[in-house]
Amino acid sequence: MVKYILKRIGASLFTLIIILSVVFILLRQMPIEGYFDNFDKLDQAVIDARLHQMGLKAPILQQMLRFFTGLLHGDLGISARYSVGAPIADIIAQKAPLSIQMGVLSMALAIALGIPLGGAMARSKSKFWDRFGTAFIVFVNAIPAAVYYIYIQSYGSNALGISMLFDRSRAISWVLPVFSMSLGNIAYYAMWLRRYMLDELNKDYVQLARAKGVASRNITMGHVFRNAFVPMIQYIPTSLLYTVGGSIYIESLYSIPGMGGLLVDVISRQDNPMVQAIVMIYSCVGIVGMLLGDILMVFLDPRITFAKKEGVR
Amino acid sequence: MPEQVVLSIKDLNVKFSLRGQMLHAIRGVSLDVYKSESLAIVGESGSGKTVLTKTFMGLLDNNGWIDSGSILFEGKDLAAFDEEKDWLKVRGRKIAMVLQDPMTSLNPLKSIGRQIGEALELHQSLKGEAAKKRIQEILADVGIEEPARRMKQYPHQFSGGMRQRVVIAIAIACKPQVLICDEPTTALDVTIQAQILNLIRDLVRKYHLTCVYITHDLGVVANVADRIAVMYAGDIVEIGTSEEVFYSPRHPYTWALLSSLPQLGIKGEELSSIRGTPPSLFKDIHGDAFAPRNPHALKIDFVQRPPYFDVSPTHKVRSWLLDSRAPEVKPPPVLSRIRREGGSLYDQ
């Protein structure tokens, strides 16, 4: 198992290097006007000096080498445009915790509501909870999130009697953004759990469990739910990590100083080192999420093993 | 046979509602199952044999219900059970079941030891070491070697035949009175079928189980059953000892069924088959359900449902042909070949 994980990590590193190289090269193809706020008014000497300072004058391979050596030393680089001269690690360390806290809370809420909803839907197929849940899922997926986010913000803050903007120190002002963030995941989990549970319910082993004398409650919990959860567990780490990455829309709606809008922001301002660093973080998050999902599967499903199997029967 | 009735079914009617239509799946079946006997229920797909046995365990699908009739078991009417907790005292403990396809009837994510242990814990409150010991005994009983190691394994580590042994182990774990085997060998390799049948037969003898086989394979029946009930369109049309049904069948449907046995075919000649299709159970059936496909049908077959005629104390047939006023009809000559081949239909 350790061997397998090491192999996967090695492959992931390779993937990461490719992603970073591609992003790196693409960024270098951007027009140089983007690096300046008032390009037209500057004379050539100033521009050259500034480009040289940003390290953009060197041959691209040399630039890349410098970037990867920096990474190996744990150095993410210095922000070139977003917050000139500040170490990128500091900028992220300042913004990430809030997004992470919010993401974890919204994930917890999504699991706490989505999983029971999906289970209730599967158990009462075509009855109240199923219809209610289906309506909810269709609603969340069909209506653009932007629309109900705004409604939640305006009606919610009214109802709670709080300001529309986020105030970190007041617990109550966390409620609306966290709830909004979790809606999509609640629908997603409920939908898939219902589907997987119905798949399982129709299998023969459920019949056999009934014939064995297991009460239907225990069949649902001990057999059906557990088995239906296996295909879901694969996606939960990924979805957790992405949620933790922050939501651009919600963070801007509530003026939350998180990670959410950062990537778009630094791309539009052509802050190459920042783009590289954030792309790397998001890639790592994705890769780690998938790896975790696969490892969890192994613990839950005995049919899956990392090692090569000896002959069966 | 010392005739002590274990399960007594009286005029049972089962209906299903399917897409707004009502399907009459079991049409007034009466049947007594005797202690320690092996009864085979045979019939083609859709004749209601599985549905009938499902009523013994309260396992009808949600859209089906017992419309009328009774199923007496240990002084209780199973047909009147409507709460799950009543059934939980019967299922697995008093009446157990072996399903058709062992590849799908075990939970793939639980070790087989746990799946057997689940039954032991429910019905005999066995846990921990005591349960472990018992599980190993049961596994050894069904012919699984190295039970201590095997009980920790998962279904995917077993072959089809071995899995069916596990399913049988679960069924006999709590020493039930009645064992229902719903086509226990249909999904298995031909070479494994005989092993599983022998295993079931041995266990039935060892534990004095009452066994109800459901099958459409008459070759299986010949080997295991003391008595045979032939079902057609939700009704038992002929019932008797194996000898009686095989060697002197009286119902035209039984004749047709036996004539279509491949074992009776002659090389180069077309195998006999039953013309037409079974009647739709969505509609009311008048008269004898088999009449439209029966070359010997009488006028009355289309008008009035035949009663049971007693051929012998153990042999009952629902056909007007046995009425004293009916013309004499000889069974198809090919059936005499069953007799000539003697003993069992074919040895496995």
Image (cartoon, coloured by chain):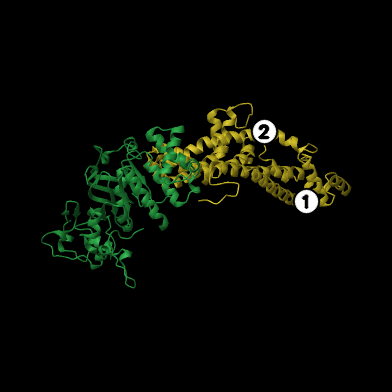
Chain colours: A yellow, B green
* Of B273 and A179, the residue lying toward us: B273
State whether residue B127 is above or below residue B178: above
Residue B118 image position (x, y, % from top left): 42, 37
**Left or right: A135 with respect to A163?**
left
| Chain where mark 2 sits | A
State whether residue B26 is above or below residue A107: below
Label annotation for residue A28: 1
- Amino acid marked by disc 2: Pro
Question: Marks 1 and 2: same chain?
Answer: yes
Residue B323 image position (x, y, % from top left): 13, 59
Dot 2 falls on a residue whose secondary structure is helix
Q: Residues within 10 Å of mark 1 (few under 14, many from 20)?
A: some
Question: What residue is disc 2 on?
Answer: A97
| Residue at x 34%, y 49% (from the top left corner) | B201
Where residue B291 sits, quadrant-wise, is bottom left
| Residue at x 59%, y 31% (from the top left corner) | A174
Extreme residue in the top direction: A170
Residue B253 image position (x, y, % from top left): 24, 60
Let me know if residue B20 appears in the view.
Answer: no
* Of A167 and A9, the residue lying toward us: A9
The answer for how far apart the CA atoms under marks 1 and 2 are is 31 Å
Discs 1, 2 touching: Cβ within 8 Å:
no
